Amino acid sequence: MQRHRARILPASARGQSAVELLVLLGIVVGLFALPYGGSASLAQVFTDAIGIGFDRFLAALSLPQ
């Protein structure tokens, strides 16, 4: 049986996928964190919804049994 040799990549090709991943992550974070069209950002809407749900949960816990 012959052993397969590992491919040696040129220095410019190493780490390319990490850069592409970081660019994609930056775009996704920008879409969620930046406001669009004068409305609140999706991150702000999400945190407000969590806060409202937590307030309702605490109010339900404080009711007498």
Image: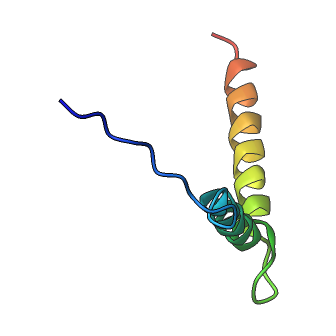
- The furthest residue to the bottom: 37
Q: Nearer the viewer, residue 61 or 51?
A: 51
Q: Is residue 19 above or below residue 50?
A: below
Picture quarter with the C terminus: top right
- The furthest residue to the front: 2
x then y, percent, for residue 47: 77, 51
Q: Nearer the viewer, residue 23 or 53?
A: 23
Picture quarter with the N terminus: top left
Q: Nearer the viewer, residue 25 or 46?
A: 25
- The furthest residue to the left: 1
Q: Residue at left 82%, top 87%?
A: 38
Q: Residue at left 62%, top 62%?
A: 10
The image quadrant of residue 19 is bottom right
The image quadrant of residue 63 is top right
Q: Residue at left 69%, top 61%?
A: 11
Q: Residue at left 79%, top 61%?
A: 44
The image quadrant of residue 50 is top right
x then y, percent, for residue 6: 44, 43
